[in-house]
């Protein structure tokens, strides 16, 4: 695995940069996925942003480019159930609210069995939806999470990753971890790192599967186009 260069920034979270005030999230209602809902690949695994079958990547800033860079390990004060380690805004190619089927990010937890939460907010900072994931290994990778429940995301909004800092959701495992940054610009849509880290973006990707009706319409459109060419 290639070495990771640490950025000389705040050792806490991306959210420490300031920016919008994100809404309060009741994570007791979140579905927490286990090891059967994700895969972990080496940090230099590429490419990203490519469609897989009927799935469509609606946002990605995970192209290889200059590579991945990390915050130092998050220094968490055990003063609550969860602690944010970063948030980032995004502008997807979707129209309106949609449901994601995959979430990819670069980073990880430092304790086997640690729980992290992924929460989505609209452009005003109001909470929309989210889920949790329990990672059965420690360390930083490219994680591809299969979203098995209906998780809504706005076409323009924020995503935040938080950690189970006091072990409430993970049988006492006090989770610390990282969400990596890169100097890469978004390859789909546009975004900027949480609250003002100029030129730096958290690495993540949103993938969705079109509704059956939309797939049918795409097929009909292709049929009509084919007839017109004749």
Image: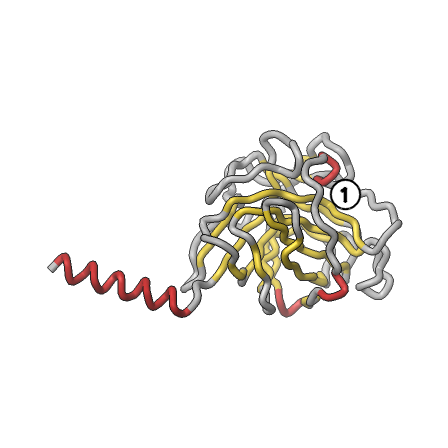
* SS at circle 1: loop
**Which residue corresponds to the image point at 58% horizontal and 31% vertical from the top-left?**
199
Task: Identify the coloring.
Answer: secondary structure
Residue 219, placed above or below residue 77: below
Q: Residue furthest right?
A: 79
Q: Residue furthest left?
A: 230
Q: Which residue is more in the foreground, 36 or 230?
A: 230
Label 1: how many residues lie within 10 Å, few (<14), some (14-19) or many (20+)? some
Residue 48, placed above or below residue 9: below
Q: Position of residue 130 (x, y in %)?
A: 65, 59
**Which residue corresponds to the image point at 59% horizontal and 55% vertical from the top-left?**
41
Locate the C terminus and report the quarter of the image it occupies: bottom left
Residue 106 in view, yes or no = yes
Residue 114, placed above or below residue 91: below
The image quarter in which residue 17 lies: top right
Q: Is residue 114 shown left or right of residue 126?
A: right
Q: Position of residue 216 (x, y in %)?
A: 34, 68
**Which residue corresponds to the image point at 77% horizontal and 62% vertical from the top-left?**
113
Q: Position of residue 54 (x, y in %)?
A: 41, 64
**Which residue corresponds to the image point at 70% horizontal and 64% vertical from the top-left?**
30
Residue 217, placed above or below residue 25: below
For label 1, the residue is: 73
Q: Which residue is more in the foreground, 20 or 81?
A: 20
Q: Which residue is more in the foreground, 229 or 9?
A: 229
Q: Is residue 69 shown left or right of residue 209?
A: right
Residue 47 in view, yes or no = no
């Amino acid at each position: 695995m290639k070495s990771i260069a640490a950025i000389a920034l705040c050792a806490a979270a991306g959210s420490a940069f300031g920016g919008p005030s994100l809404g309060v999230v009741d994570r007791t209602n979140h579905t927490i996925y286990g090891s059967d809902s994700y895969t972990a690949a080496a940090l230099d695994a590429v490419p990203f942003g490519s469609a897989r079958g009927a799935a469509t990547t609606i946002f990605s800033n995970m192209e290889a480019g200059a590579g991945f860079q990390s915050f130092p390990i998050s220094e968490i004060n055990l003063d609550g159930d969860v602690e944010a380690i970063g948030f980032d805004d995004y502008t997807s190619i979707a129209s309106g609210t949609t449901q994601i089927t995959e979430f990819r990010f670069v980073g990880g937890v430092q304790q086997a069995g640690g729980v992290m939460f992924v929460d989505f907010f609209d452009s005003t900072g109001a909470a929309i939806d989210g889920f949790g994931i329990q990672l059965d290994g420690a360390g930083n990778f490219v994680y591809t999470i299969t979203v098995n429940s209906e998780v809504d995301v706005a076409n323009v909004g924020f995503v935040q990753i938080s950690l189970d800092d006091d072990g409430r959701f993970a049988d006492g495992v006090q989770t610390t971890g990282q969400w990596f940054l890169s100097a890469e610009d978004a390859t789909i849509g546009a975004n900027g790192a949480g609250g003002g880290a100029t030129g730096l973006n958290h690495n993540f990707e949103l993938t969705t599967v079109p509704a059956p009706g939309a797939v049918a319409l795409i097929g009909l459109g292709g049929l009509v186009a084919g007839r017109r060419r004749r």
